Image: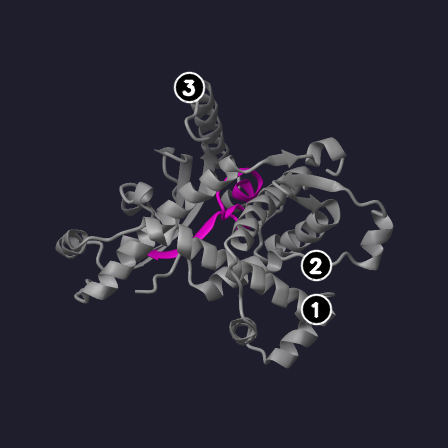
Amino acid sequence: MRSRLIAPLAMALMMALPLGAAPLTAAAQQLKPLDHIVAVVNEGAIMYSELESRVARVRDQLSQRGVTPPSDAALEQQVLDRMIVEEIQLQMARDANLSVDDTELNRTVRSVAENNGMSLEAFADTLEADGLSLAAVREDVRRELLMRQLQQRRVASRVTVSEREVDRYLEQQGANDGVRYRLAHIMVALPQSPSQAQIDDARDKIEDLRRQLENGADFASLAAAESDGGQALNGGDLGWRAAAEIPSIFTNAVPSLDVGEVSEPIRSPSGFHLVKLSDREGGQGRNLTQRDQVRQTLFQRKANDEMEVWLQEIRADAYIDNRLNESGAS
């Protein structure tokens, strides 16, 4: 069974493409004529020009979503953190000799264009009007496909679903059957084997973030500025989830939330979390009887949980020298 990870590829690509690397415009090069390293990741390096290109595109993406971008310094750090994790994965993919053939690449790029309601030719023209190129987007897609391959190998291999789990799921279908939830998420991460002081600091921060929300702070803007989760730059949005697809750490909290309500801080091995129920629909008692469909649903939920742990592990194992603050780039 070929199982999905985290999100359907088309959705993952659409979320990742606005964050892809692109050449600096001539104006930006005039403003920042001297490039420099902002992070060393194992044997690789991330340049300031790459970071600023990504930051500009993320800022546009947040604005299009109606999310107030965080401060320049906070946004730079959020984007750099994502770039570091991507770089680690791409290095691992190269070490594993993973590759993407042209047929798969062309098919995926065409799918991205079609998902935007355009032919490939119109897509290329739109990119050019935005100062990008089809070649740059093809490279973004290639990188994303390589990371998906790696995740399939490293994360999917950790996940199993037993027949008993399928039976238990079918037995438990009831009030939540057919319900779908739109969720958002803020996370304060903990390192592996954290000290008590680190746990206390993380707990204090998540409680402070919840107080800010209670005092009227916008959830999406706060997530973009402060969350350590992979969805931070999407305003913490986790999208729509069926009841069985909710991350396991949230399953007890989410059904009891009112729309618009934020949970109390939730502890997991990865850190502390706040989850917001943005919307809810369904609940008409849809009966899932197909075991393969149930097995896939359970696999997806487990994979979502395992992915977050795996990303923390590979980051902890990598050599990372974050020079952003030293460089005066902020």
Query: Disc 3, disc 1: CB below 8 Å?
Result: no
Question: Helix, strand, or loop for circle 2?
Answer: loop
**Upstream in the sequence, badge 3 or badge 1?**
1
Query: Disc 2, disc 1: CB below 8 Å?
Result: yes
Question: Helix, strand, or loop for circle 1?
Answer: loop
**Upstream in the sequence, badge 2 or badge 3?**
2
Q: Say which of 112 and 233 sits in front.
A: 112
In the picture, residue 242 is in which quadrant? bottom left
Which label sits on residue 196?
Answer: 3
Structural distance between the alpha carbons of marks 2 and 1: 8 Å
Location of the N terminus (image quadrant):
bottom left
Q: Residues within 10 Å of mark 2 (few under 14, many from 20)?
A: many
Question: Helix, strand, or loop for circle 3?
Answer: helix
**Position of residue 320 measured from the top left corner of the image (x, y, whole percent):** 60, 36
Q: Is residue 289 above or below residue 241?
A: below
Amino acid type at circle 2 is Ala
Question: Where are the magenta residues, as a range?
Answer: 221-243
Amino acid type at circle 1 is Ser
Label 1: which residue? 133
Which label sits on residue 22?
Answer: 2
